[in-house]
């Protein structure tokens, strides 16, 4: 059962077809299965990094373009005159937009060591960056467009591209996480099996101890019974038995004599009591 689950985790469609072919069974210990599952899990993580490398490079390129746009927007000057109030509010919106673009860019930095946990963290940061850019465009885009419409439109386009790449990254990581969760569940099943085996061994050990104790008690009882039987068959036991019988006979005789003495005394006292009564009447 464990091996079948292992095959379902490791293999894809081709591996399942291969598994259906009649081949010799592979003998694996539980520890070997655990090591193989752990190895395959780590391999799956490395494959994720390699498979996502093109997507990460695209994200890095988008970040560079956003940084370049930020520099251009920071130094940009309006091509035509506008009302002073509009100019002032547009410049303030420009300042706030540049600030938020900078914050978003910091969260878009692709980690140099793209291990599994780093990719998960980056995925969250990238989603935050996308949300920050979209919200900043909603809040300040229209005002900034009065002076720099081209730059704002370019920022919108880059934000849409980033959204698509973020979705692509998130989907790939979610699919891979489902497979890694299968590995974790499988390894947890093995650990639980080990605990059950240990518990079973402990119970068997306790049962064995109880059996030994029962055997010892039975042996002691048998010895005592044999000793008692031997004692019953011995001449000493017969002597004790006869002595006990004699003792009981003496007790019975003693009781009879005591009753007889008491009766005699009572007979002797009867006339004496009559004489006492006569004297008392006189």
Image: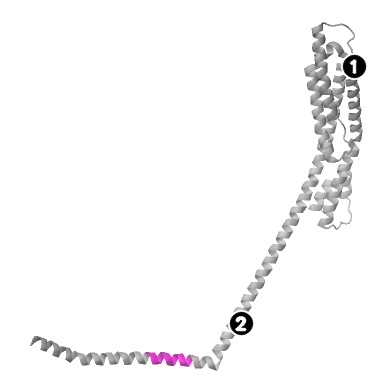
Report x, y in % for residue 38. 84, 49
Give the image location of residue 206, x and y in percent.
Answer: 67, 66
Query: Rounded to the nearest whole Å, what is the CA distance between mark 1 and mark 2?
Result: 108 Å
Q: Which of pointers 1 and 2 lies earlier in the amino acid sequence? A: 1
Q: Viewed as shown, does residue 162 lie left or right of 280?
A: right
The residue range painted magenta reads 241-251
Q: Is residue 21 above or below residue 173?
A: below
252 relative to 197, above or below = below
Residue bearing the label numbered 2: 223
Q: Let me know if residue 12 appears in the view.
A: no
Q: Residue at x 91, y 26 (%)?
A: 64
Kindly identify the residue that appears in the image at 76 percent across and 53 percent down: 191
Disc 1 is placed on an element classified as: helix
Task: In this rendered view, identify the residue nearer to me: 166 or 71.
Answer: 71
In the displayed structure image, the side of residue 272 where residue 235 appears, left or right: right
Task: Please state if 98 lies on the left or on the right of 214 as rendered.
Answer: right
């Amino acid at each position: 059962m464990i091996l079948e689950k292992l095959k379902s985790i490791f293999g894809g469609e081709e591996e399942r077809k291969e598994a259906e072919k009649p081949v010799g069974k592979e003998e694996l210990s539980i520890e070997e299965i655990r090591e193989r599952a752990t190895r395959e899990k780590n391999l799956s993580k490395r494959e994720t990094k390699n498979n996502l490398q093109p997507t990460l490079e695209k994200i890095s390129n988008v970040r560079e373009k956003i940084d370049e746009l930020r520099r251009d927007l920071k130094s940009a000057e309006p091509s035509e005159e506008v009302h002073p109030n509009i100019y002032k509010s547009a410049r303030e919106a420009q300042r706030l937009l540049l600030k938020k673009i900078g914050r978003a860019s910091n969260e878009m930095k692709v980690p140099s060591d793209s291990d599994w946990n780093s990719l998960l963290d980056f995925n969250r940061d990238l989603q935050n960056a996308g949300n920050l850019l979209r919200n900043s465009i909603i809040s300040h885009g229209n005002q900034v467009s009065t002076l720099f419409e081209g730059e704002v439109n370019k920022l919108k386009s880059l934000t849409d591209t980033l959204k698509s790449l973020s979705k692509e990254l998130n989907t790939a990581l979610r699919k891979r996480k489902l497979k890694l969760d299968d590995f974790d569940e499988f390894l947890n099943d093995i650990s639980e099996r080990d605990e059950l085996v240990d518990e079973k061994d402990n119970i068997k050990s306790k049962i064995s101890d109880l059996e030994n104790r029962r055997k010892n008690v039975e042996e002691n009882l048998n010895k005592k019974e044999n000793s008692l039987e031997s004692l019953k068959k011995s001449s000493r036991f017969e002597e004790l038995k006869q002595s006990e019988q004699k003792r009981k006979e003496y007790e019975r005789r003693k009781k009879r004599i005591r009753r007889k003495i008491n009766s005699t005394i009572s007979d002797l006292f009867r006339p004496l009591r009559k004489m006492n009564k006569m004297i008392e009447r006189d």
